Image (cartoon, rainbow, N blue to C red):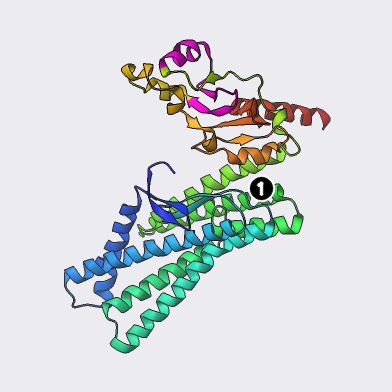
Amino acid sequence: MNGSVRVGHVVGVPLRVHWSVPLLVGLFAYGLGHQGLPVWTPGRSDGVYALAGVVGAALLMGSLVLHETAHARAALRRQISVQDVTLWALGGTTRMGRPQSAAAAFAVAVSGPLTSLVIGGVALGAGFGLHGLSGWAVPAVVLAWLGWANLFLGVFNLLPAVPLDGGRVLQAALWWRTGDRDRADLAASRGGQIMGLLLVAAGWISVLRGAPGGLWIVFIGLFVLIVAGAERRRAAVHTALRGIRVADAMSSPVVTGADWLTVGRFIDEVAVHAHHSALPLLDFEGRPSGIVQLSRLAAVPGPSRETVRVREAALPLSQCATAAPDDPLSEALERINLRTGARLLVVDAGHLVGIVTGKDIARLMRRTTLSGGGTG
């Protein structure tokens, strides 16, 4: 996610924090320390309330990490690749590959809410237990607040709306029942769009009735609406590309450049004659070694262009999206992300035989649409 920085790892997966998280922590700390605790446990100093608010907010962030870690762990156990876990203003997200079975999809989706519900029950039980021993002391209230927050998080995430976990559970259930993943994805994404609209409407009604917190519901509803719409479009693409191989979409031959050239020579001999914003690179043996963005070459300082090799400014092959000519195109496109760029290198027996770009997909989609229209 743009605007996030890596802060560590969980279960071997990079953990990233978005710039909005400190704002979220501040809002929770303020709400607990200046609004909740003074009402529930009056008579303490402002310093005690402030410290307890920060501790409670930090514990809530920790529980969000555990929620996402549960998703990542469940995915890794089922041989699903996980790119990273990111915390941001609306909670957290775990980027991963597509599950290969409905059972795996269900297990991954339900793991997060179950973790939140367990944390909520334990924290709430500890809070009430501490209350029984010492009354409503500040630690007891913080634990009770943490418990209710996690119970709400777990229940809310089980709403049947993509991209919430409940929407993923619905996807898995429909996939298991129909045997058609793309059909299940379309149905679940429609449900997500409807739920997003309902949340936006409910939030605005709350705001009009004098509850500023309704704006938060509006933001969540908009997020659900946008992501559900994107997933619906992706599911439509998967349906349209069903049965199509990578070789059917790729462009060939491919304009390439030698990775051992200096940046200066590469610009003069290759880049200025190419009509592409990125070019695949080949090593001494003619095998693909990566892909270079021309904007990266332009950023190399002039004096360094005669000593820096172009491969040093390129994205190595290990980090590129690759596929074989006979791979299903819909599955191969899942390997494309912000890091790899919107290009798929087609490699056969270690040699580059083609490339798939966004233009190739658009052209194929138009051809598929015309073909379908002609047979209807």
Where the C terminus falls, by quadrant? top right
Amino acid at dot 1: Leu
195 to 127, vertically: above or below = above
**Tag 1 residue:** 186
Q: Secondary structure at mark 1?
A: helix
73 to 327, vertically: above or below = below
Please tell me in which quadrant of the rendered image residue 285 appears: top right
* Number of callouts: 1
The foreground one among 106 and 174 is 106
Q: Position of residue 369 (x, y in %)?
A: 73, 30
Which residues are drawn in magenta? Answer: 264-292
Q: Is residue 88 visible?
A: no
**Mark 1 surroundings: few (<14), some (14-19) or many (≥20) residues within 10 A:** many
| Residue ID at (57%, 56%) | 76
258 to 289, vertically: above or below = above
Please tell me in which quadrant of the rendered image residue 281 appears: top right
Q: Is residue 61 magenta?
A: no
Q: Is residue 283 magenta?
A: yes
Where the N terminus falls, by quadrant? top left
Q: Position of residue 109 (x, y in %)?
A: 58, 59
| Residue ID at (37%, 75%) | 144
Q: Is residue 279 visible?
A: yes
| Residue ID at (70%, 32%) | 325
| Residue ID at (69%, 32%) | 246
